[in-house]
Amino acid sequence: MPKKDRERTSKRENKSEVKSEVKQELIIERIEQRWQPEDDLKLKLAVEQVKDLEQVHSAITFSCYFTLAEIEGRWRHLLTETNIAAAAASEISALSLNAFHRAVEESCLFSEEESEILMNEVGVIKDPSLDFFAKLLQKNAARFHSCRTPASLYEQWQLLYKYRLLSDQQIPHPSQSLQHQDVLILDLEASVINNESKHRSRHQCTEIQRLEKQIDALEPLLNALKKEDTPYSNAPSRPPSADHSTEPKSKIPAISITPEKTDNEKYCAQIAGDFTSFKFPETSAEITIGRGNVDVDLTREIGSSRVHRRHCVIYKFTEAPNDEACFLLRNTGERPVIVNGRQLGLDGTSWLSHNSLIQVQAVNLMFRRINS
């Protein structure tokens, strides 16, 4: 092979190698440009908590989608490349306080030690409250992360309770499962199915109308601010009158006194949930299940945000004084109610027997008779 041809081939090989190196550098630069300072902060905190990149990839929401390989490569660069690590640290330090705290709250996963405290040391609580978790956080301040609050501990404990991960809980047999995927769903009419979408669209329309009213109310103020001399700039300040003092008035909290229940009252049935228990008095002809000022208030239950204010009503029927009472449930809300695997639409009814399962959205209730 002649010498000129050898030189040409060597030059071509060198050019191809240089091109491939330039392409790799461009690819690395593009990947690094996708990583925001919030993403680096989330990655660092999450890895420090759980020490598992696969779990970080499945649990953390970054500013854009990253594959597991990209997350592993970024973590490797932060550990080995001093220039990249220094640049990321300087960008993180330049974040605002709000962005910093938001990134910490979104990425600070619960570590194994924190989960062990909630699962084994706390376990099942009959009457959980924020005060209890505040005392728990104060007692184990060194073991919990500094961003933990009583509300975050309460939410994590509720998730562990819902999925039966606490030490005192037992996983039921699949035949006794109370999950919604085991429910027999009936064919419903189109009007019943579209109730949910109508409810959402109605809520959005009311929100749009409220915002439009706020805009109309703020337009005169904006027009006044655009002018150089506002009509309020030379106005004298109003002296404080005797009736309107500048000192803040102390607010006296209203005390509501509820009458005590007598022990002589008899009950014919009981409705029990995870954190709710209500006894059906024999003197009452009907009770209401929902949220707020109703007989059975499901506000404290897990997943009760989609329950209506008055979702369903239970009626009691007795043919004779000595006969056993019969109970009928009627759905008064737009969202369905499931009784023993049977789905009830609006105004749907179903008879209740002993140990009946009532599912109001994500809330499971057990209906039991009480033998007097």
Image: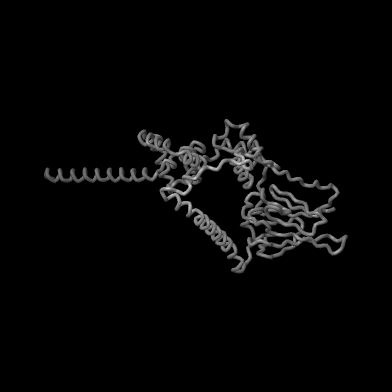
Q: Is residue 177 visible?
A: no
The extreme right residue here reads: 322
Using the image as rendered, state which of residue 50 and residue 99 is in the foreground: 99
Seen at 15% across and 43% down, the residue is 7
Seen at 77% across and 51% down, the residue is 279
Using the image as rendered, state which of residue 62 and residue 67 is in the foreground: 62
Q: Position of residue 153 (x, y in %)?
A: 60, 40
Image quadrant occupied by the N terminus: top left
Q: Position of residue 306 (x, y in %)?
A: 62, 55
Is residue 213 left or right of 349 when viewed as pictured? left
Is residue 155 left or right of 340 when viewed as pictured? left
Using the rendered view, name the quadrant where residue 317 is placed.
Answer: bottom right
The mark tally for this picture is: 0
The coloring applied to the image is: one colour
Q: Position of residue 367 (x, y in %)?
A: 74, 55
Seen at 76% across and 45% down, the residue is 257
Is residue 121 left or right of 148 when viewed as pictured? right
Using the image as rendered, state which of residue 29 and residue 285 is in the foreground: 285
Q: Is residue 8 visible?
A: yes
Q: Position of residue 74 (x, y in %)?
A: 40, 40
